[in-house]
Amino acid sequence: MTTHRLASSVLLALVLSVLASSTASAQILIAPTPPPSSRVTIAEAPLESAPHQRPLWRAVAAGAGLLGGAWALNVVGSGLWMLAPTGVASADLLVPTWNGHAAAFFDWSLVPIVGPFAQMAYVDHPEWQLPLLAIDGLLQIAGLVTAIVGQVSRETVTRDDDGPQISVVPAVSAQSLGLNVTGSF
């Protein structure tokens, strides 16, 4: 066990020395330090928090999620419905069918917002398909309206931080060797 810890410590020291030497050489090659006479010292003033306006991103995300979720459920549900055999073959070759269902039913499911309402013309069982399609279409419209309202509306925010901050720290234990990365955004 002691040999393992010693090997881990030596490996960590080796990695850190390589990182330190490559960082130092990169600084010399990329940005040599200017001579003392030409250095300009800038006093670091605290960043002032300036309020600014931005869209209501939570509402935009919720609306996009509602629209996309309802649309995806419509596409998946329509696809599964098209896979269900009806036992009826199409007698009319001018009407393309898919397991006895009108192919246009699935084709319209690929169109968001308008699709569920257009699908109503191709339903096989109107007693339960019409309400489902109406609810799905209304959910898609509600998602679109919510996303638009979130984009048009503005909220005032004050930035108190300097921006994203990331910290990388070596991590050593008896069982592992690695890096811990933490940050705030």
Image (spheres, rainbow, N blue to C red):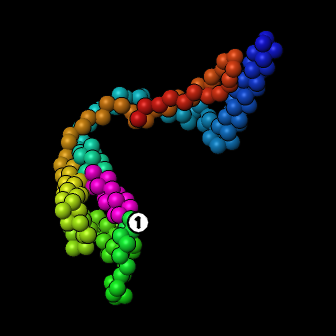
Direction right: furthest residue: 3
What x and y, as percent, mark residue 43? Answer: 42, 28
Taking the spot 64% from the left edge, 43% from the top edge, the residue there is 30
Amino acid type, callout 1: Leu
Q: Pointer 1: what residue?
A: 83
Closest to the observer, 182 or 123? 123
Q: Within 10 angstroms of label 1, few (less than 14), some, or many (20 or more) residues?
A: few
Closest to the observer, 143 or 126? 126
Q: Secondary structure at mark 1?
A: helix
Secondary structure mainly formed by the magenta segment: helix
Q: Specify the segment rendered in magenta.
A: 66-81
In which quadrant of the rendered image does the N terminus lie? top right
Name the side, left or right, on which 79 lies relative to 28.
left
Query: Vertical placement of 3 versus 45: above or below?
Result: above
> Which quadrant holds residue 77?
bottom left
Residue 127 in sight here: yes
What x and y, as percent, mark residue 53? Answer: 23, 44
